[in-house]
Image (tube, rainbow, N blue to C red):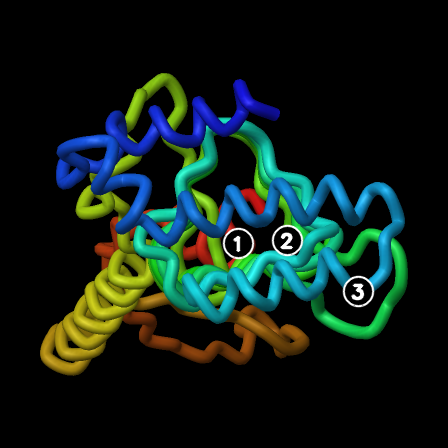
Amino acid sequence: MFKTIVKDFRIIFDRDPAARNWMEVLTCYPGLQALLLHRFAHRLYRLHLPFIPRFISHLARFLTGIEIHPGASIGCGVFIDHGMGVVIGETAIIGDYALIYQGVTLGGTGKESGKRHPTLGENVVVGAGAKVLGNLNIGNNVRIGAGSVVLRDVPSDCTVVGVPGRVVYRSGVRVNPLEHGSLPDSEAQVIRTLVDRIETLEQQIKDLQEAPPVATIEIRSGESHGNSANSHTATVSVAPNSCSLSEHVLQEFFDGTGI
């Protein structure tokens, strides 16, 4: 337990440029204080002591604004930055070196019993205000964008954005966990694609209205009367297919991009 606390303390200097000295970190970082109280409460909880673990959790919530159920399992080197409004449920599991920002909820979706809260892998980053709900498995090295709502499992090495959360793969690219400005905007891409499609279709309609017929097809039908047959002439306007938009962006968005 002592080694875990040391890792919790040291990771702050690695991930927060505002951390200047050990006294400041010990006294002014509610995320560290909440974790210290939680680790003590969690040990008592595993001994099946009544009341005391929940009271310690409630006390930590009053002092730090961070609510962690004593039953939650939290790995080493976890950093809760700022932390106000963070809620972590009873059966939640958080892997080593996770980074959690303020307003995050790792919660359930109903009154079911058993495992009902998320499991986060190692090196997971959960942005401010994000919600991960239900018994989900979030893989290693996953980044969840600020304000996202994750309702399905997420494979490793992915970035999740939007409501509901959608995955954008970043294969082979190592991303700094603090670079939240580099998160992709899948909704903006889809809206841009739809606008481009509308403009293309409007241009096609305009071209069809203005262009003269480019092909005349004579269709013969009916029974022959002597050497002649009934004939009908149909005029068909043919226009080139100018829609070069890719269906890939839209299909990925509607399918949840891999979720």
In percent of width and height, residue 234 lies at: 38, 76
Q: How many residues crowd mark 3 within 10 Å: few (<14), some (14–19), many (20+)?
A: few
* x and y percentages locating residue 97 in the rendered image: 46, 29
Circle number at residue 51: 3
**In which quadrant is the N terminus drawn?**
top right
Mark 1 vs 2, N-terminal side:
2
Task: Please tell me which of labels 3 and 2 falls first in the chain.
Answer: 3
Which of the 4 quarters of the picture holds residue 55? bottom right
Q: How far apart are marks 1 and 2 (CA)?
A: 10 Å
Name the residue carrying label 2. 152
17, 105: nearer the viewer = 17
Mark 1 → mark 3, Cα distance in angstroms = 42 Å
Q: In this view, does 132 lie to the left or right of 137?
A: left
Residue 144 vertical position relative to residue 97 in the rendered view, above or below: below
- Foreground pick, 187 / 251: 187
Q: Position of residue 56 (x, y in %)?
A: 63, 59
Q: Which amino acid does label 3 sit on?
A: Phe
In percent of width and height, residue 192 lies at 22, 63
Q: Distance between the residues labelled 3 and 2?
A: 33 Å
Q: Quadrant of residue 133?
A: bottom right
| SS class, disc 3 | loop
The answer to whether marks 1 and 2 mark residues whose Cβ atoms lie closer than 8 Å is yes
Position of 120 with respect to 52 (left or right) is left
Along the horizontal axis of the image, is 109 left or right of 30?
Answer: right
* Residue type (three-letter) at the residue carrying disc 2: Arg
* Vertical order, 233 against 131 (above or below): below
* 79 horizontally vs 4: left or right: left
- Which-is-in-front pick, marks 1 and 3? 3
Mark 1 lies on residue: 256
